[in-house]
Image: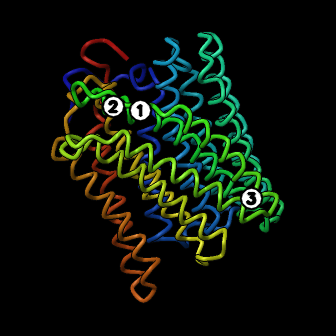
Amino acid sequence: MPAATPFSWSAFFSIGFRPFYALSCLWGIVSIAVWVYYPTALTGWLPAYYWHAHEMLWGFVVTIAAGFLLTASANWTGHNPLRGKPLALLALFWVFIRLGLLLPEALGFYLSFTAGLAFYALLTAALARVIMLAGNRRNLLMPVFVGGLGLSDLLFLWSAYQNHYQVLSQYLQTGLLLMCLVTLLIGRRVIPFFTSRAIPNREVPTHLRTGMAQLALTVVAVASVWLAWPSAQAFALMLIAVLAIIQAWHWWSAPARHIPLLWILYLGWLGLAGGLLVTAAQSLDLIHNPAWSAHTIGMAGFGLLIIGMITRTALGHLGLPLKTDRSIFTMYALFIGATLLRLAAIAFTAARLPLLHMASLAWILCLVLYLWRFLPTLLRPRADGKL
């Protein structure tokens, strides 16, 4: 829905969520369309299966998180981490990573690896700089976790290039768990905050102690991946999930069921908890298909939280009313449908292909609708002159 103000590159690169929400959604459309409908086009140095896993986690989910953190840290500290040319440079590094993964061996690897190193170094340094500048001690660990996500990404790429495929699943699990940790830290702040803002006279506890416990337990889970302690990993993941369910129980308020901008976040939070329980069962060899873990965490957890966050934060930061219009409600319905269909494709192998195609179509339509709804506004300055 076009705004009256003209297109502006300076507006687009004024704050992190603008370019990275747009790029992530665009890439989410292209990457799924290619992977599902035209996989023979994937002729780059990274084998197609690993390319898909890499791009869903680090190319889509982590990129959305980067855009959110660049924006949120400006609110936390009063300092915008990146804007203008530095932010455009970060976006260019991101594009080079994606391009490098599609090119032949050697050239493709060195481009994607070098661009990835530059991307994570600049992102981590920018977040650390404003947090330290503001003396914002409660967020000091966030750049560390972002750096950990970057390290797991780079080690994944390096191992794939060296044909050390036996450790790729460990790097992927490490990246997933670190992203779970970042998601838990972010969600534990924004879900209570959004709830208290949307529901008058509602005091919502932040659960600082349970959040710290989740942090420690995630460290245990990551260590267990590398020490081959499946029982310890399962125990840690189950505790993290139970704590997340308890947090949601304490945050929830009956009026939230009438506010789609809220209930989609609660649904994603519970989906993440469910994904952690599935992963715990998988680590105990109770579930043998790894697709259950990856897609429950990735779609029921990260995915639903992402579609909720990128609509809610875009509305708020673009100066639009915090209301769910028909297009946003349709996005939520499409993404929930995509999630259910993708999980059904794992459960019902006889109908796997048609279910997978329907799930992919719902995913693509959801992100196309997001770009149709928000891209014109992301590309233009706010009418009130704010970021």
Badge 1 vs badge 3, beta-carbon distance below 8 Å: no
In depth, the one of 87 and 132 nearer the eye is 132
In depth, the one of 13 and 198 nearer the eye is 198
Q: Which residue is mark 1?
A: 190
Q: Which mark is residue 328?
A: none
In depth, the one of 100 and 64 nearer the eye is 64
- Measure the alpha-carbon separation of dots 2 and 1: 6 Å
- The residue drawn where x is 35% and y is 58% is 364
- The residue drawn where x is 57% and y is 50% is 240
Q: Which residue is mark 2?
A: 194
Q: Is the residue marked by circle 1 packed among few (<14), some (14-19), or many (20+) residues within 10 Å?
A: some
User: Is residue 324 in sight in this rendering?
Assistant: yes
Badge 2 vs badge 3, beta-carbon distance below 8 Å: no
Q: Position of residue 307 (x, y in %)?
A: 36, 46
User: Is residue 107 in sight in this rendering?
Assistant: no
Q: Amino acid at mark 1?
A: Val
Which quadrant holds residue 377? top left
Q: Position of residue 18 (x, y in %)?
A: 41, 30
- The residue drawn where x is 79% and y is 68% is 166
Q: Position of residue 347 (x, y in %)?
A: 44, 80
Q: Amino acid at mark 3?
A: Val
Image position of 207 with respect to 299: above or below: above
Image position of 120 with respect to 303: above or below: above
- Measure the alpha-carbon separation of dots 1 and 3: 29 Å
Which quadrant holds residue 9? top left
Q: Is the residue marked by circle 2 packed among few (<14), some (14-19), or many (20+) residues within 10 Å?
A: some
